[in-house]
């Protein structure tokens, strides 16, 4: 993979990890449009996911420090309760990732039709969430389980993780800003867990020719992630998710149309 394609895919990952349009779906669409076959697919995925996780840590550094402080104080305070909810929300996705890893990986093989259909599902979720009334309600333990299930379902290519989790949280009656904060924080431990698993699997290999493209992809994903994370919080607060609903619907229909054209023409 050359540097230009690495930068383009890095930007796509950085933006779509936080914007509710499905990072996995857009990466698959991006690879199809660019005609990129990633021999170092797993390594590139690890690198750009680490970049977006790092951008989340930078944006929420104060929140994360408060959570860690609350955990290690071992006191039943608000920070400890919030951290416990984050842990609860991780369980469904962790179980699905471990039990169905091979089946999930099989779906990430240029399955553009699935991506298109799931983008339409994302569009419906975003539209419903955008119409929901804002409240001051905090995420409850029961909510954390349901949001966690939404995150597990969002492991399918084309369903936006942030879109699914934020929409689910808002539809459960939670404050929109708190829903976005919870959504972004709940994925960080999972990303680092997945990165650690991939590193210790022994399947990663780095060649000298890959260093520059991977570095370019990392920087692009990190910078785009910083921008997208900040922007997304403001958009959720201002109830602007309908724009992304329309976007996902259009891209989903285009993806389905593209598959139909390739099949019959």
Image (cartoon, grey):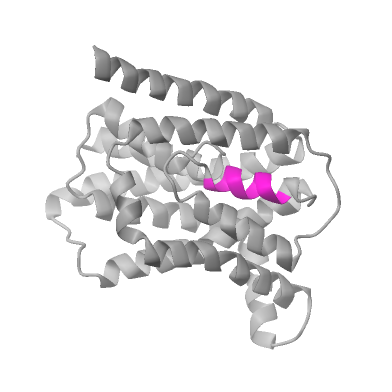
Q: Is residue 228 above or below residue 90?
A: above
The residue positioned 27% from the left and 49% from the top of the image is: 214
- Kindly indicate the quadrant of the structure image that contains residue 26: top left
- Position of the C terminus by quadrant: top left
Q: From where the camera sits, is residue 59 visible?
A: no
Q: From where the camera sits, is residue 56 visible?
A: yes
The stretch drawn in magenta includes residue 168: yes
Give the percent coordinates (x, y) of residue 154: 50, 48
Magenta span: predominant SS is: helix
Q: Is residue 236 above or below residue 259?
A: below
Give the percent coordinates (x, y) of residue 39: 17, 46
The stretch drawn in magenta includes residue 56: no
User: Furthest-front residue in view?
Assistant: 264
**Numbered range of the magenta stretch:** 161-169
- Kindly indicate the quadrant of the structure image that contains residue 131: top right
Q: Is residue 58 left or right of residue 169?
A: left
Q: Is residue 83 left or right of residue 76?
A: left
The residue positioned 70% from the left and 31% from the top of the image is: 240
Give the percent coordinates (x, y) of residue 115: 41, 35
- Position of the N terminus by quadrant: top left
The residue positioned 42% from the left and 68% from the top of the image is: 193
The residue positioned 24% from the left and 44% from the top of the image is: 213
Q: Nearer the viewer, residue 33 or 100?
A: 100
């Amino acid at each position: 993979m050359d540097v230009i394609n690495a930068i383009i895919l890095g930007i796509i990952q950085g933006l779509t990890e936080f914007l509710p349009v499905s990072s996995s779906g857009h990466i698959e669409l991006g690879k199809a449009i660019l005609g990129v076959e990633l021999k170092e697919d797993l390594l590139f995925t690890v690198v750009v996911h680490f970049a977006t996780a790092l951008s989340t840590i930078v944006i929420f550094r104060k929140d994360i420090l408060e959570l860690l402080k609350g955990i290690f104080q071992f006191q039943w305070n608000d920070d400890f309760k919030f951290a416990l909810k984050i842990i609860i929300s991780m369980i469904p996705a962790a179980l699905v990732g471990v039990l169905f890893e091979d089946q999930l990986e099989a779906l990430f093989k240029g399955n553009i039709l699935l991506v298109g259909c799931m983008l339409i599902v994302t569009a419906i979720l975003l539209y419903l969430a955008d119409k929901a009334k804002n409240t001051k309600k905090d995420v409850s333990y029961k909510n954390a389980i349901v949001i966690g299930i939404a995150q597990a379902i969002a492991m399918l290519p084309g369903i936006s993780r942030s879109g699914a989790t934020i929409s689910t949280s808002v539809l459960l009656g939670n404050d929109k800003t708190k829903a976005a904060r919870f959504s972004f924080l709940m994925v960080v431990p999972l990303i680092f867990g997945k990165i650690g698993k991939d590193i210790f699997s022994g399947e990663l290999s780095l060649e000298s020719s890959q260093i520059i493209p991977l570095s370019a992809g990392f920087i692009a994903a990190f910078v785009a992630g910083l921008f997208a994370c900040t922007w997304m919080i403001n958009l959720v607060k201002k109830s602007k998710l309908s724009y992304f609903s329309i976007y996902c619907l259009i891209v989903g229909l285009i993806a389905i149309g593209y598959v139909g054209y390739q099949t019959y023409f």
